Amino acid sequence: MSTIVEKILSRASGTEARAGDRVWASVDVVAMRDFGGPNAIAEYGKNFGDKPPFDPKKIVFTFDLYAPARNERVAKNQKICREFAKKHGCVLFDVQWGIGQHTLLENGFVGPGDVIIGTDSHMNLLGAVGAFAVGVGTTDIVAAMAEGKLWFRVPETIKIVVDGAMKRGVYPKDLILSVVGDLGTSGALYKSIEFDGTLIRKLSLDGRITIMSMITEMSAKTGFIIPDAKLLNYINSRRRERGLADTKLIYPDPDAEYFDVLYMNAGEVEPVLACPHSPANVKIVSDVEGVEVDQVFIGSCTNGRFEDMLVAAEILHGRKVADNTRLIIVPATVNVLKKMLETGVYDTLVRAGAIIGSPSCALCTTGHPGILAEGEVMVSTSNRNFPGKLGKGAEVYLASPATAAATAIEGKITDPRKYL
């Protein structure tokens, strides 16, 4: 009668964990970014001095927020992390690697059933491969670094079943924006979400990441998509490179108890976007067409994967970005960037007029090249569009890479089906 999260936390705690229980669970990975990591190191030193972390090979630093460093303060913070990692033998992915969660996944640190915590609120996107991954605060990071365990309240679970097939011009981003629009920004407060259904099972890893990267916008604690055989082989091949044994899938019991079960027909979804200033302010693209746009961003932990770049390149091939619009594209990881170069996608995007940045989180928040001025409008493939997040007085619309690319060509919000 157990859900996925109940099974994972039962294994990790050595108890029979049920929704609502409080358990102490063993942690498989403790991840820190260049933002948040220095604070955790300072608190760790204050409380534990020179005590080595519980397992240095499970303590991972990823530099993705400001990569490379944009000022002296950021450079200093990154230096603090580098020195701590070197001193204690922790794992470090420096500025060239890309977004932390994606880098962990690509390098064998994530598998079904793993318990992973990190300083990023979108840590739970690793549920795309069945891991229990959550963003936590500094005190929790420090405690887990020292003891290898952390306290959790076992969340109740919402199951979302998505059947059917997506229509032309509809992508995973449209699906998850539609879900966020229906449930609202607090519709899954401290819940786990299990996605299932014929459509979900057909999604690639890139599509699954898009879905899972936005459950935070519904206030979900964590979430899960069960990997298929191809994805499990990918995960295990990465684990073997680290000398780890193969992992196995975790399924919910047929009679698992859910807080709610929701059903969705993918065939009814249209290209949509989230209008300012909330991820839940979702409207059909055709109803908002014509709004002039100053800038378009394609990237982030939500849509910085190769498939996202390929969709954009297919639309932009042989076309140009509008004169009144800037197009900024940032791949999620160095591996995505390499594939863009190998396949010609990079060349296509540059010839269309795109500016391509180093792998990083980039335009998810202020402090990066491309921040907006007051009164400017951007269409972004990221996951948040709150007031001031990308420039005081600016407006941000959230959309799929296809809608973003079509908008870049027209210089105004455009239905992507015009170019498909």
Image (cartoon, rainbow, N blue to C red):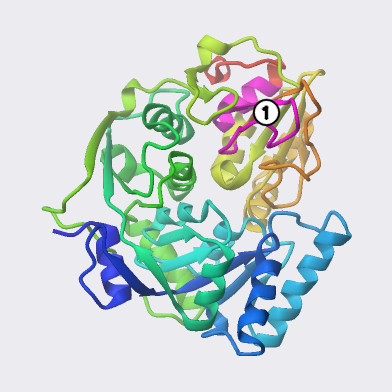
Q: Does the magenta stretch include residue 258?
A: no
Which of the pair 145/254 is nearer the observer? 145
Boundaries of the magenta span: 382-408
Residue occupied by mark 1? 317
- Residue at x 48%, y 40% (from the top left corner): 217
* Vertical order, 44 against 415 (above or below): below
Q: Does the magenta stretch include residue 393?
A: yes
Dot 1 alpha-carbon crowd within 10 angstroms: few under 14, some 14 to 19, many 20 or more: some
Q: Taking the image as drawn, is residue 222 in sight? A: yes
Q: Going by the picture, which residue comes out furthest to the front? A: 47
Q: In which quarter of the image is residue 391?
A: top right
Q: Where residue 285 appears, x then y in whole percent?
A: 52, 17
- Residue at x 63%, y 56% (from the top left corner): 99
* Vertical order, 313 against 395 (above or below): below
Q: Where residue 94 appears, x then y in whole percent?
A: 72, 67
The amino acid type of the residue labelled 1 equals: His
Q: Taking the image as drawn, is residue 247 in sight? A: no
Q: Where residue 146 appears, x then y in whole percent?
A: 53, 82
Q: Number of callouts in the render?
A: 1
Q: Quadrant of residue 245?
A: bottom left
Which of the pair 281/4 is nearer the observer? 281
Q: Quadrant of residue 25?
A: bottom left
- Residue at x 78%, y 66% (from the top left corner): 77
Q: Is mark 1 on a helix, strand or loop?
A: loop
- Is 140 on the left-hand or right-hand side of 376? left
